[in-house]
Image (cartoon, helix red, strand yellow):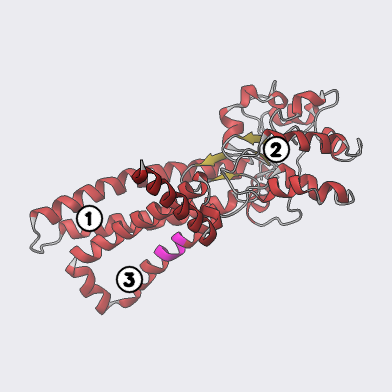
């Protein structure tokens, strides 16, 4: 019994010391997030480090043509930086948009509960007591502030109860969804990425695309290095060949996944869609009755690309559901005049 008590006391003191040194590691979600990032970094170092250890020709080439290896290592470092940059970014939460849109309501903005929920990182769950406090505070908001702003974005006659989140008790703008992993409503919700440990939404979808793009380039380059090593005439021991084949197989599967993911999100980018809208189109009320070939929020390829990559007009832009007349017009096939005038762009 005494030994058990000593071990329990030691664990408590160790947890307390870790919490003091790293406040973000005081809960399991933060520990999981940090552990996941460490695994991702370790995998990158393993795939790249092994080829440098095994391939003598690569070392010799780095001396003869240092620019080649320098560019490769730059791509490697940029990919890792982009990973941490994307994983630490905010997808754009509805609660933050409410704070911005209701800037005149100082009581609402400065509320400790709202600030705590807004600043909480992914995986930190909001208690039911905080949700109840949030419900009381939302009910005290001016009825013509956030409610009017959001309801004007939906088709006339829409019921407010259809767009109220049952978890956050706030009115969701179009294209928003509650993420159960983050325990928040996300603007233009795409998906929750387990590898990044964060949601992908309005504010970080572009960063996510660039991360996939950079990861794909790094993966292609690394696959080429492994194939070059296996095809070389160097004397290679059997265990080196075995390890290289195993790692190459894993890289090929990763490359296929990355290419599919990159093409899919490129399609979403040029059509102004999200993964959630494509996968759950029949379950989203304001998308009912819209033909499958019609992308309701698309404004043409060029404008979609500009909005996705370059537009900084508003940190929390809210998109309205187009009227049914406009959607019916989009469903009509293009004429020669439309093609000549580049209507699709």
Q: What's the residue at 64%, 41% (across, down)?
A: 272
| Label 3 Cα neighbours within 10 Å, binned few <14 / some 14-19 / many ≥20 | some
Please report whichever mark, 2 or 1, sits nearer to the chain's N-terminal start.
Answer: 1
Place of residue 251 in the rendered image (x, y in percent of width and height, measured from the top left): 31, 49
Q: What's the residue at 61%, 32% (across, down)?
A: 277
The quarter of the rendered structure image containing the C terminus is top right
Cβ–Cβ under 8 Å for marks 3 and 1: no
Place of residue 43 in the rendered image (x, y in percent of width and height, measured from the top left): 34, 54
Q: What's the residue at 62%, 22% (across, down)?
A: 282
Q: What stretch is highlighted in magenta?
A: 75-80
| Label 2 Cα neighbours within 10 Å, binned few <14 / some 14-19 / many ≥20 | some
In space, the residues marked 3 and 2 are separated at their CA atoms by: 44 Å
Which residue is disc 3 drawn over? Answer: 69
Image mark for residue 306 = none
In space, the residues marked 2 and 1 are separated at their CA atoms by: 44 Å
Q: Classify 94 as above or below 241.
A: above
Please report whichever mark, 3 or 1, sits nearer to the chain's N-terminal start.
Answer: 3
Is 76 magenta? The answer is yes
Which residue is disc 1 drawn over? Answer: 227
Q: What element carries label 3?
A: helix
Mark 3 or 2, closer to the camera: 3
293 to the left or right of 248:
right
Which residue is disc 2 drawn over? Answer: 297
């Amino acid at each position: 019994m005494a030994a058990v008590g000593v071990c329990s006391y030691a664990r408590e003191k160790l947890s307390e010391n870790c919490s003091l040194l790293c406040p973000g590691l005081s809960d399991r979600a933060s520990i999981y997030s940090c552990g996941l990032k460490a695994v991702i970094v370790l995998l990158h170092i393993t795939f790249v480090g092994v080829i440098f250890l095994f391939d003598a020709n690569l070392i010799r080439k780095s001396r003869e043509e240092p620019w080649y290896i320098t560019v490769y290592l730059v791509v490697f470092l940029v990919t890792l930086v982009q990973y941490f940059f994307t994983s630490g970014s905010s997808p754009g939460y509805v609660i933050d948009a409410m704070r911005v849109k209701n800037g005149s309501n100082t009581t609402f903005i400065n509320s400790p509960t709202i600030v705590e929920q807004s600043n909480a990182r992914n995986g930190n769950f909001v208690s039911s007591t905080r949700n109840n406090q949030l419900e009381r505070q939302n009910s005290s908001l001016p009825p013509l502030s956030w409610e009017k702003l959001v309801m004007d974005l939906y088709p006339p006659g829409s019921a407010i109860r259809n767009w109220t989140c049952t978890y956050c008790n706030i009115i969701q703008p179009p294209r928003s969804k509650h993420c159960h992993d983050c325990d928040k409503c996300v603007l233009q919700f795409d998906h929750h990425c387990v590898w990044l440990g964060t949601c992908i939404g309005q504010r970080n979808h572009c960063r996510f695309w660039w991360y996939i793009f950079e990861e794909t380039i790094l993966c292609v380059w690394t696959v080429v290095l492994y194939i070059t090593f296996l095809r070389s005439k160097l004397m290679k021991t059997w265990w080196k060949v075995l390890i290289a084949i195993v790692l190459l197989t894993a890289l090929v599967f990763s490359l296929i996944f990355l290419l599919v993911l990159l093409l899919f999100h490129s399609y979403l980018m040029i059509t102004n869609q999200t993964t959630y809208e494509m996968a759950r189109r029949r379950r989203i009320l304001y998308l009912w009755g819209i033909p499958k070939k019609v992308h309701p929020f698309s404004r043409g390829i060029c404008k979609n690309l500009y909005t996705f990559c370059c537009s900084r007009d508003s940190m929390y832009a809210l998109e309205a559901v187009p009227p049914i007349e406009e959607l019916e017009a989009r469903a009509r096939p293009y004429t020669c005049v439309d093609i000549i005038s580049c209507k699709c762009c």
